[in-house]
Amino acid sequence: MSPPISSPESAAASPEIVKEEQEPIVEVDDKVATLTVQLLVHAFCLMMYLIPIFTPNPFGGPTLDEMHIMSSDNKDVSGESSLQDLFKNDYWGRPMNSESSHRSWRPLTVLSFRYLKGIYSGSELTMHRCVNILTHAAAAEAVGILATRLFAPSTLWRSLTLKMITKVVFALHPTHVEVTANAANRNHIMAVLFSATLADPECPLWFFIIALIGGFLCSETFIFQIPAAIVTATVIQYYHDRRRDGDDDCRKSRLPVVVDYLVSAIRIFPRTFFQVLAVALYLGGRAYFDTLDIPEGLIRPAENPFYHFVGEHRVRNYLYVLAIHLAKSWGMDPIGFSHEYGFECIPAVEDWSDPRLSLVVFIGAVMILSLVMAFVFPGTLLGPVAIQWAWSLTLFPITGLVRVGTFISDRIVVASTVSVSFWVGFGLWYWLIKGRTLMPAAPLQSICIVWLLSVSYVKVHNRSLQWMDSLSLLESSLQTCPRFAKVHMETSKIYSGLYPEKFNLLKAREHLNTAREIDPNMCDLHQQFAFVAIQEGNFLEYEEELTQAVLCPFTMGGALPSWQRYWQVAMQNARNEMEQMEVHQRQAKYAAIITEAVAEAQRKEAEDA
């Protein structure tokens, strides 16, 4: 796919927002020069992430979910499971119909981990991250091409500069770090690559079909990007039709504009039909297999503290959550950087007088104003506003209207940055090429643009470095969320043996005590308390905490084998019959606690049934 080269005559028929003055320009006919520029920009999009992952780091290694894709126990990635089982499992290797499954069906993403890990002879983790970087650069290229389709500059050089500026703006968006530097979030950037491909009405049909199938196979969030792809393709087709027909009048009547959009929609109807049909088949299949909703028991306050809010309180808080994501998509971060924002990280909005709701008012006013302007100037603004709203609606999963386990995260924002990249890229390009009001000369404008992009680059670079190891990632999260219980628990793991150089049981216990003070109901804490206690030689505490870890549904799998092994070893190490009796009594006491808890759970399950 290459950007269209329109004639000057056709440019005169472009929508008002992209209409260019006729002035002498220097056309660039040298294909070598244009290819060189594109290669240099693409290399920049790659190197901005390659530099951090190849920067020496004594604590470097897999972070968070990367540990899952690197685990030898992950049979779907290691290749031990069959392809049939892989397609039946979720992203974490659990059967999709299991009550322990988050219903994240991403077989294509899992296959990419399975087969794209042996090309690079060095670290397997580095290879996984490199694949993410290549995918991200490809998505940036697709967004740049869409910008040229949308605005159709009149010359090759202008088309090239618009494409490159938009591409760099997209690549430098700070919310993309989480899906690019962290290999485990590959599904999100793959989905954007496929949806941007679908949004191009000039994409070959065979490639369109591949992108449509690939999108549904790579991420469950892809379904929310289908409306954005359809709207974007329709608007691009509409602008193409207007340029072709030479229709550049500023219409007073709104009806012809709507009719023209309908005509353009009909021209790409086969593609729209395929997408709508695919959505229906996907949702029908998920409903048939009963895998649409995440089991409510897997939605935890530690990760999604607002989920259980009801009524007005729920509306108020989820409006704030939505406003945060919209602000992030526009490059504003009102809460600071953290890999997660869980319990006590973002305090609940208790009433309508909370000053934080001013963000909701501001974002809402801007969005409503855009609708009003689109109605007043439909021939000029209807398309751009429709595109912006469509890509903003990719944030639907965090509106509180559907059941999701995620609360606030940068990875959810990535799709919505596509339209933002259009407008920021076009604004910078137009200011550079045509703007003469704010700055006296183009060189000064170029310096300002380079400065803005350089500031974004430094921000992305520093954030990427934080994602290279768990220590810096958790430290950055504690700066943003000093009362985030889960992060305190994860930090305790750093000091209790995850990094031998940082081994400090006193610090490990301090973080655990803080976590328990903040969220005493987070049952994951028991396993980590047990791990610290056994290293301190506090066996009685270990027995109690390990028993509670067995009862925690999130740590049961690892705690139960440890519990069984411990009592075998304890019995063998008993020096006399009295000690054996004491060990047996303690084991019987904790076994009774487990038995009683299991019986109670079964009673509740029977009552619910």
Image (cartoon, rainbow, N blue to C red):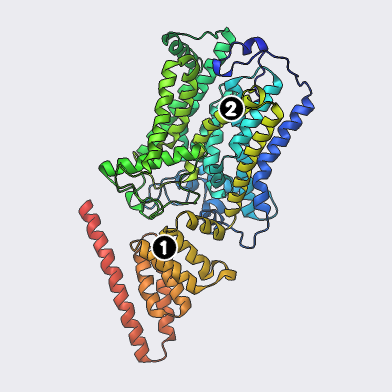
- The residue at the point 77 percent across, 20 percent down is 29
Q: In the image, is 316 to the left or to the right of 171?
A: left
Camera-side mark, 2 or 1: 2
Q: Is residue 118 visible?
A: no
The image's mark for residue 557 is 1
Foreground residue among 193 and 273? 193
Residue 589 lies, with reference to residue 359, above or below; the image says: below
> Mark 2 = which residue?
427
Amino acid tagged 2: Gly
Q: Is residue 46 visible?
A: yes
Foreground residue among 462 and 362? 362
Q: In the image, is 437 to the left or to the right of 507?
A: right
Instruction: Look at the numbered disc 2 and give the secondary structure of its residue.
Output: helix
Q: Splitting the image into 4 quarters, where does residue 556 fall?
A: bottom left
Q: Which percent across, then down, holds residue 404?
A: 38, 44
Q: Please identify the quadrant where the N terminus is shown.
A: top right
Amino acid tagged 1: Gly
Q: Which percent across, then down, holds residue 131?
A: 62, 45
